[in-house]
Amino acid sequence: MLALAIIGISAGRLYGQSTGDIYLIGTSITAPGNLTGFERYNDTDKSPLYLRSPIFFIIRSLENSYEIEFSHFCFNPSELMKIRPVQSDDIMQIVTVSESLLSSYNPIDVADFLATKTKAQAEAWREENQDKKVWIIDRSHGYGNGTMTLIETRIFFIPLTRWSSN
């Protein structure tokens, strides 16, 4: 079953994190498809434009016709400068921290989010949080033995009109 939670952090800064950041924790699947749930895709692009290959996560509700995509990019500044100026969010972080770090926060269950949010509510949530950092903790990758990996991402939105009868 989908085991996800969004955790609002009100503590101080850690590894470039701020109090307005959102934390998403869950067990992703890597099999792409038209499924309700939490999907992860590791891009295999070996371009010199990236220091690390991009990583994408999708929360998808077919029942309510929405997807919320989270993207991680870590551009190579020297290559990116050939195209455009480097911006502060062009070099997103991946950090490993103690698993106990998030234990004192009240999580919001994303399975409930998926089951209860309408398309309009999901779009409103996305709009409200579109400028925030979202740190994803994927239990399928880098979680366990007392540590967890946080992947800095940003929110993108894809309407699922192809599944809508309207």
Image: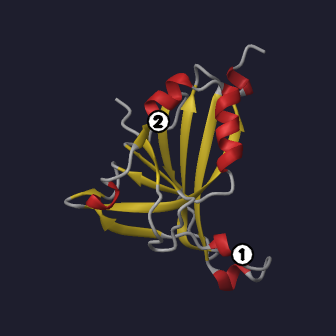
Mark 2 or 1, which is nearer the eye? 2
x then y, percent, for residue 89: 65, 70
State whether residue 37 is above or below residue 134: above
State the residue in front, 129 or 142: 129
x then y, percent, for residue 15: 46, 74
x then y, percent, for residue 33: 53, 32
State the residue in front, 98 or 161: 98
* Location of mark 1 (residue): 87
State the residue in front, 4 or 101: 101
Q: In which quadrant will I find the C terminus?
A: top right
Question: How far apart are the alpha carbons under marks 2 and 1?
Answer: 31 Å
Residue drawn at (32%, 61%), measured in percent from left and top?
101
Residue drawn at (47%, 58%), measured in percent from left and top?
10
State whether residue 143 is above or below residue 65: below
Q: Secondary structure at mark 2?
A: helix
x then y, percent, for residue 139: 33, 49
Can see residue 154?
A: yes
Of all residues shown, which one is farthest toward the bottom?
78
Residue drawn at (38%, 33%), measured in percent from left and top?
2
34 left or right of 15 in image: right
Is there a contact, CB below 8 Å, between mark 2 and mark 1?
Answer: no
Q: Secondary structure at mark 1?
A: loop
Residue type beneath disc 1: Gln
Could you tell which of marks 2 and 1 lies nearer the N-terminus?
1
68 left or right of 22 in image: right
Can see residue 36?
A: no
* Location of mark 2 (residue): 110
Quadrant of residue 51 within the rendered picture: bottom right
State whether residue 7 is above or below residue 54: above
Q: How is the image coloured?
A: secondary structure
Of all residues shown, which one is farthest toward the top?
165
